[in-house]
């Protein structure tokens, strides 16, 4: 064996081993000690992927965290159950300033508007709230809307009002039974400060994510930003918990479609690197 | 003459040739020399003594035999034609095997606990890399080595991607670096341009994402601002100037062509959609500026290629000059001109180009009285 052969062999093997070692040490560090937070989620907050294309050949299972944002505008109520496309009510000018994004002033020139439009998403820490005030407010708002529309339909024979009432009732059913109760309610740049503000680790999780400044033109509250996504919203299911998720259907396509699959409770921990993992899972009656 | 014979014996087959492409280049040169020598002798322009002829034949015969034995080079045109077929089969085989490994793992990984999954991933990456090294020692032709090298690279990519998926690791552009590292290591080991390009694409993506991050972008969106690719293009173009690639046929050209694509494609995008630029000027002005820059840069690149004798650079420069030109023609005249006139203008421009290049070629081919280039 000549020297160059040995050098290449050592370099290649070394590279593969070092990369794997770094990844595994990272994982071990993330999962070491007490988790940063521990949320008990259900089929409402964790969804299985839709089987399409070559995904049907995938023998593994990865769940997706279903998160939402409190709405900034009543007009966007339809997006309530999707909860991702609408501006976040709390991501106002003051919060954006705190996160280092200067909102666009109403007196902005064309050049300033162009510069602002080029500002992309910013990486921040996001606070996830499980089944807390944000969910209850959303539920109350949907109830109120359903009640108002039902009253209006009762006092009129207009088909549009009847359709509106049906739609509002379906939204309410969805909100009560299957919509996610996991809301992104705050953002910050400092983990300790956020944790001091939200000390309950079984209701509030802090994760990495991205926010987007408000759009220059478009609907919605002009100065409310958007939550663009979580850095890691996928939770892999290990072999031992696979039976719990058997026969769990993917999220419904149509509004008003009732969830007919098995119910489960899954404990998802967020570790020191703010990356999630599945700690336990069991079927619910 | 005895001295010449001694030299033949000494030089024999022990010349420092280390790659198949280098051996093939020498084989082609020897074949061309033999054909020319035959012709010169037939026309009685050069008459060698029997001893001289024997010495040359013996020397070349030794070299060719050695190259054939060590590198499985093509000794004639027929063998060369068959080799092209083998190269295509090797490329398709490498890509198909890489895809097969990906889907194989995908099909069964869910049936194993995490520890077994990790063990399989690491073992497959290490095993295929070791197998590549072993095959390289046995395979003179290099086709099987290239195939194995591509599979080893695919296994390593799969290894890192799946570790991320198994442990929910936040995606990061840092993964591009080890991928680039292994791809380049395998490319130089197996003399594989496909792996070189794969490695360089990882490098381009990494530099692009870092440029975007420095400008305040989230790394995954670096493609949204085409200017992020410019630093990578510049760096890649100059790599063959700093490192020697004589032993690897086509590597220097691959660097330069990829660098030019990384420069001109984003420029072409910005020349049509100015709002994608980092610059906050009026998008129409940005668009026009990049159109002008595209013309200037492609002309400059063509000039540089002619000056340095880099055919691949000339071709790439000309192709992009024409694309920039025809895109402009389309913008100006597609709607307003009758179609026969539009295509006539395009055709006449091509003729004009041919004339310009003919003059340029004549100038380059003219011998320089000072002896330099």
Image (tube, coloured by chain):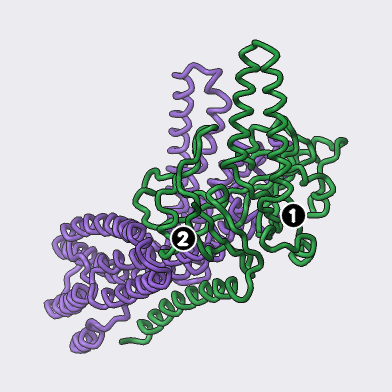
Q: Which chain is green?
A: A
Q: Quadrant of residue A198?
A: bottom right
- In the image, B354 versus A42, the foreground residue is A42
Whether residue B12 sits left or right of residue B354 in the image: it is left
On the question of residue B350 being in view, the answer is yes
What colour has chain B?
A: purple
Which quadrant does the N terminus of chain A fall into?
Answer: bottom left
On the rendered structure, is A174 left or right of B310? right
Which of the two marks, 1 or 2, is nearer to us in this view? 2
Q: Tag 2's secondary structure?
A: loop
Label drawn at residue A237:
2
Image coords of residue B248 (percent x, y): 37, 68
**Residue found 70% across the figure and 40% down from its top:** A138
Secondary structure category for the residue under label 1? strand
Q: Is residue A67 above or below residue A166?
A: below
Same chain assignment for discs 1 and 2 = yes
- The chain letter for the residue carrying disc 1 is A
A254 horizontally vs A95: left or right: left
Query: Residue tagged by mark 1?
Result: A187
Q: Is residue B131 left or right of residue A149?
A: left
Q: Residue at x 62, y 18 (%)?
A: A162
Number of the label disc, if any, that sits on residue B192: none
Name the chain letter of the residue that bears numbered label 2: A
- Whether residue A117 is visible to the viewer of this picture, yes or no, is no
Q: x, y percentage for residue B221?
A: 60, 50
Query: Residue B46's x, y, as percent?
Result: 20, 68
Q: Residues within 10 Å of mark 1 (few under 14, many from 20)?
A: many
Q: Nearer the viewer, residue B234 or A254?
A: A254
- Name, please, the residue furthest toward the right: A107
């Amino acid at each position: 064996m000549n020297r160059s052969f040995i050098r290449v062999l050592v370099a290649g093997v070394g590279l593969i081993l070092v990369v794997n070692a770094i990844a595994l040490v990272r994982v071990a560090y993330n999962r070491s000690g007490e988790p940063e937070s521990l949320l008990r989620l259900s089929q409402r907050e964790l969804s299985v992927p839709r089987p399409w294309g070559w995904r049907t050949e995938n023998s593994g299972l990865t769940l997706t965290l279903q998160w939402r944002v409190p709405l900034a505008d009543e007009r966007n109520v339809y997006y309530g159950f999707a909860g991702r496309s609408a501006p976040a009510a709390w991501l106002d000018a003051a919060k954006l300033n705190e996160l280092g994004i200067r909102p666009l002033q109403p007196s902005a020139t064309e050049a300033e508007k162009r510069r602002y439009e080029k500002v992309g998403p910013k990486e921040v820490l996001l606070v996830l709230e499980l089944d807390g005030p944000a969910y209850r407010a959303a539920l109350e708002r949907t109830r109120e809307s359903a009640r108002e529309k039902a009253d209006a339909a009762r006092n009129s024979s207009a088909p549009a009002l009847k359709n509106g009432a049906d739609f509002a009732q379906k939204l309410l059913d969805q909100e009560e039974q299957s919509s996610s109760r996991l809301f992104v309610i705050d953002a910050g740049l400092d983990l300790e400060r956020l944790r001091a503000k939200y000390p309950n680790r079984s209701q509030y999780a802090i994760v990495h994510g991205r926010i987007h400044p408000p759009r220059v033109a478009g609907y919605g509250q002009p100065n409310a930003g958007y939550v663009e996504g979580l850095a890691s919203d996928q939770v892999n299911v290990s072999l031992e918990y696979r039976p719990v998720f058997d026969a769990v259907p993917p999220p419904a396509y149509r509004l008003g479609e009732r969830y007919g699959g098995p119910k489960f409770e899954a404990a998802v921990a967020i570790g020191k690197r703010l990356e999630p993992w599945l700690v336990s899972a069991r079927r619910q009656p | 003459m005895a001295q010449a014979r001694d030299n033949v014996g000494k030089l024999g087959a022990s010349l420092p040739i280390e790659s198949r492409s280098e051996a093939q280049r020498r084989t082609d040169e020897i074949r061309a020399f033999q054909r020319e020598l035959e012709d010169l002798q037939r026309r009685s322009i050069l008459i060698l003594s029997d001893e001289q002829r024997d010495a040359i034949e013996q020397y070349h015969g030794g070299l060719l035999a050695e190259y054939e034995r060590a590198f499985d080079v093509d000794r004639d045109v027929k063998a060369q034609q068959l080799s092209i077929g083998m190269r295509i089969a090797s490329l398709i085989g490498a890509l198909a095997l890489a895809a097969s490994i990906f889907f194989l793992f995908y099909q069964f990984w869910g049936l194993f606990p995490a520890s077994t999954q990790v063990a399989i991933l690491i073992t497959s990456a290490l095993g295929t890399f070791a197998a590549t090294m072993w095959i390289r020692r046995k395979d003179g032709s290099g086709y099987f080595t290239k195939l194995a090298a591509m599979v080893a690279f695919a296994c390593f990519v799969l290894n890192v991607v799946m570790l991320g998926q198994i442990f929910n690791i936040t995606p990061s552009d840092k993964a591009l670096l080890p991928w680039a590292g292994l791809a380049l290591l395998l490319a130089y080991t197996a003399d594989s341009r496909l792996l070189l390009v794969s490695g360089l694409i990882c490098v381009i993506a990494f530099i692009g994402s870092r440029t975007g991050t420095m400008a305040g972008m989230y790394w995954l969106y670096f493609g949204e601002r085409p200017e992020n690719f410019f630093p990578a293009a510049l760096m890649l173009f100059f790599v063959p100037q700093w490192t020697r690639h004589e032993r690897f046929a086509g590597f220097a050209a691959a660097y330069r062509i990829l660098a030019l694509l990384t420069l001109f494609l984003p420029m072409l995008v910005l020349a049509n959609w100015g709002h994608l630029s980092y610059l906050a000027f009026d998008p129409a002005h940005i668009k026009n500026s990049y159109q002008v820059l595209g013309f200037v840069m492609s002309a400059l690149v063509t000039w540089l290629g002619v000056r340095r004798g880099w055919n691949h650079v000339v071709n790439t420069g000309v192709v992009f000059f024409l694309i920039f030109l025809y895109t402009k023609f389309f913008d100006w005249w597609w709607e307003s001109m009758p179609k026969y006139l539009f295509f006539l203008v395009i055709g006449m421009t091509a003729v004009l180009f041919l004339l310009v290049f003919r003059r340029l070629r004549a100038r380059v081919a003219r011998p320089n009285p000072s002896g330099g280039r």
